[in-house]
Image (cartoon, rainbow, N blue to C red):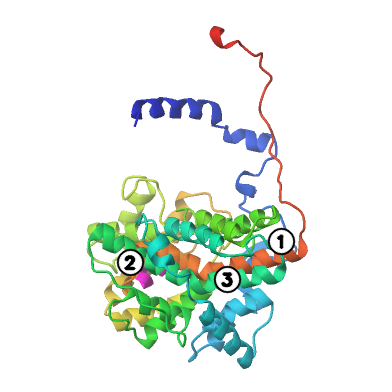
Amino acid sequence: MHTTYFSEKGQLCMEHDHINRELYSAYGVKAGLRDENGNGVLAGLTNISDVQAFSCQNGKKVPCDGKLFYRGYNISDLIQGSTGKKFAFEEVAYLLIFGQLPSLQELEQFCRILSEARRVPSNFTKDVIMKAPTSDIMNSMTKSVLTLASYDKKTDDLSLENALRQSIQLISIFPMLAVYGYHAFSHYKKNTSMYIHRPDPALSTAENFLRMLRPDMRYSALEARVLDVALLLHAEHGGGNNSTFTTRVVTSAGSDTYASTAAALCSLKGIRHGGANIMVMHMMKDIKAHVRHYGDEEEVAAYLEKILNHEAFDKKGLIYGMGHAVYSLSDPREVVFKSFVEKLAEEKGKKHDLKLYTTIETVAPRLIAKKRKIFKGVSPNVDFYSGFVYDMLGIPHELYTPLFAIARIAGWSAHRIEEMASANKIIRPAYKSLCKGKDYVEREHR
């Protein structure tokens, strides 16, 4: 459709819209709301979570092993406390939204309410999810969320109680929107068999996801546990990450729950945000095709050098899954997750593949540190292993980012509630205009 036209006009846009990076420093503008050291601009206050990557020693800011707290609780303690129990994600969702850990009775009641809410309107699956199926399940989920607003008689009710009701409903049905969206795509676009399994009210979010995804509805206890932990680790990550900030921006404008959630989904699908683990998997597939000995650090390093030098893989010079916008020496989510990755690799007979990951984890930070100007250190982030876990669980690539959304809807909901309860002011940052006055020229003389 007019390819040449859009190509030419694209060049015109670059001519008029490209802003020299040096001007950001000249005007003191922090690109991406971060300073030159990668520190985020303080844009708000939150009681929901805390991300720590530095400690103060003798008045100096020093990189340290990362820590992540949900409502003041270290995620490591939350995971250890749920050992041998299911509903780890549900317990954390309760904590994030209501601000305190639930008692046994409160957790049982919360899980019961989630189960009761885990249903979509009559014919919604057929009339909405299965219409115009696409491999982009995030787009499918966004469409479904916006359409759900049409079924809610209180869509525009901005009371805290109504926002809580809507949030809990979305937390409950996100797995259905994702899995059913994938099955529609798989059936209509890939010519596979169609099956729609209903969720089981007695099962956790993780268990129901596996049950609805698999033809035989079967899964092992370890598989469910690892996915439950993955959801817990992805549930929240401070108010400054792109999708959560998007939630708060749209909420601050006085928009409804469905609109703010749809906006967050649109943010999360980006490859710079929630889509990163897919890029890790694509990169690992490429590395496997070019490296023979997974434990040979020299051989692995030689190919990683080519990736960093823009000579291999996608030639963007990035080792995906390495580094984080906040963390320095380590990502606590990756540290916690790795032990579960090892257990699952043992069960699935994937220890040979795991060897490649651990070799890259050892070699890549050194190579990046030599190649780049690093202010805070570089280490694997949670995306480095999450794709590997999803692959071992037999989860298709199309559902990697939707799984992130299934977890993060808990954090989005908590931040929406907090924004509604405390801010009462529209978020509106300033932009420095570079426009210069021009004399208008009549159309016939241009």
* Residue 76 x/y as whole percent: 56, 80
Label 1 sits on residue:
60
Please give the name of the residue rendered at 77% of the width and 58% of the height, measured from the top-left corner. 424
Please tell me whether the stretch drawn in magenta is mainly helix, strand or loop.
helix
Left/right of residue 91 with respect to residue 198 in the rendered view: right
Residue count near mark 1 (Cα–Cα under 10 Å), binned few <14, some 14–19, many ≥20: few
Amino acid type for the residue under numbered disc 1: Lys
Quadrant, the C terminus: top right
Residue type marked 2: His
Name the image quarter holding the N terminus: top left
Asked if the stretch drawn in magenta spans residue 388, the answer is: yes
Compared with 288, 223 (above or below) is: below
Residue under numbered circle 3: 410
Which numbered disc covers residue 14?
Answer: none
Q: Nearer the viewer, mark 2 or mark 3?
A: 2
Residue 434 appears left or right of 364: right
Q: Nearer the viewer, residue 371 or 35?
A: 35
Q: Nearer the viewer, mark 2 or mark 1?
A: 2
| Marked residue nearer the N-terminal end (1 or 3) | 1
Specify which label sits upstream in the sequence, 2 or 1. 1
Any mark on residue 183, and which?
2
Q: Distance of mark 1 from mark 3, alpha carbons?
A: 35 Å
Task: Label 2, secondary structure: give it.
Answer: helix
- Residue 241, x across and y down, in percent: 59, 59
Identity, as a three-letter code, of the amino acid under mark 3: Ala
Q: Provide the residue span drawn in magenta.
A: 385-390
